[in-house]
Each structure stands twice: as structure tokens, then as C-alpha cells.
Image (tube, rainbow, N blue to C red):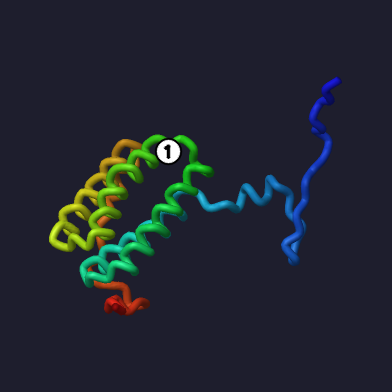
Amino acid sequence: MATEPATDHTHVVDNGKAELTLDELAGIQPGMARLMVEVSDRMWKCYHAGKARNRPLARYQLSEATKIMKGSVIVRPKYTDSMQRFIDEEMASLRQVVEAEEWDRFDSVFEAVVRATNRYHEEFEKGFLVWTVPQDPPRDLDLTPRS
């Protein structure tokens, strides 16, 4: 005989400073706006690492940006199909260029990533968000290739 799931209980977690319910934890999870700031930062650094021909750093930043994008659909599932398409197409093309160190193609492929980013912003009625790559390289990283 199957039992009905309990509905009269609350899960509480303790972070060492406070006890939080799962609903409270869910409420403080970052939304797409916060996550995309992290993606933007990674992609900016990826771009400048690629311009410096620093494959390990460009690869790392691209990988981290992709992980954030994959996680973002957990909090905003309406973006799942578009985000997966972006990862499978634009991000995969950029990854291929970085892995092969095809630096002569890097700019054009990265520009395609930027165009697609802004097309998706339009698609989801966020056309006022026009992403561009900051022209100045990041000051917090030495972009010089190590090997």
C-alpha cells in the first residue's frame, strides 16, 4: 500500500549563522540577471586571453562561463532550449577555435558569439541589453601565456 507524501513538514538547513527553510534558500538563489554578470565577466576575460593567445586561460574562462550558463536554466527554465542551442552552437564554435589555437579566426567567431548573445536578448524582450566586449583587458589577470 502506497503512502501519501508528507506535506506537514519543513526542511531546515543550518549554515552556521542561521537556520533557513528550503523556500528561504530558493529565494536567495541568483536569478538570470546576476548570473549573466558572471558570464559577461568570464567572456570578457576569455576574449582578452584569446587576443593574448593564452589558450589555457581562454579555455578556462570559456569553460566557467559555460558552466554558469548551464546552471542558469535551473532557476530560469524558460531559457533552457535557447541556452542549450547557444552552448551547442556559438560556444562550441568558440571552444573549437580556442582548442585549435586558430587565432586568425578568433575575432570573427567571438563576434558571432556577441551577435548571437544580443539576438537572444531581443528574442526574450531584453533588447535593451546590448552586450559588447570591454576594450580594456582585465586588470586582475596577467594575460601573458605561461608556456
Q: Is residue 41 visible?
A: no
Where does residue 115 sit, x and y in percent of width and height? 22, 47
- Which one is in front, 91 or 19? 91
Badge 1 density bin: few <14, some 14–19, many ≥20, Cα 10 Å: some
Residue at x-position 49% and y-position 41%: 76
Residue at x-position 16% and y-position 54%: 108
Three-letter amino acid code of the residue under disc 1: Tyr
Where does residue 109 sit, x and y in percent of width and height? 20, 52
Question: Where on the picture, by quarter, is residue 57?
Answer: bottom left
Q: Is residue 21 visible?
A: yes
Question: Where on the picture, by quarter, is residue 85?
Answer: top left
Question: In the drawing, does residue 120 fall left or right of residue 51?
Answer: right
Eyeballing the image, is 80 above or below 57? above
**Which quarter of the figure is the C terminus placed in?**
bottom left
Label 1, on which residue? Answer: 79
Residue at x-position 68% and y-position 50%: 24
Q: Describe the element under mark 1 as helix, strand or loop.
A: helix
- Which one is in front, 74 or 130? 74
Question: In the drawing, does residue 72 fall left or right of residue 113?
Answer: right
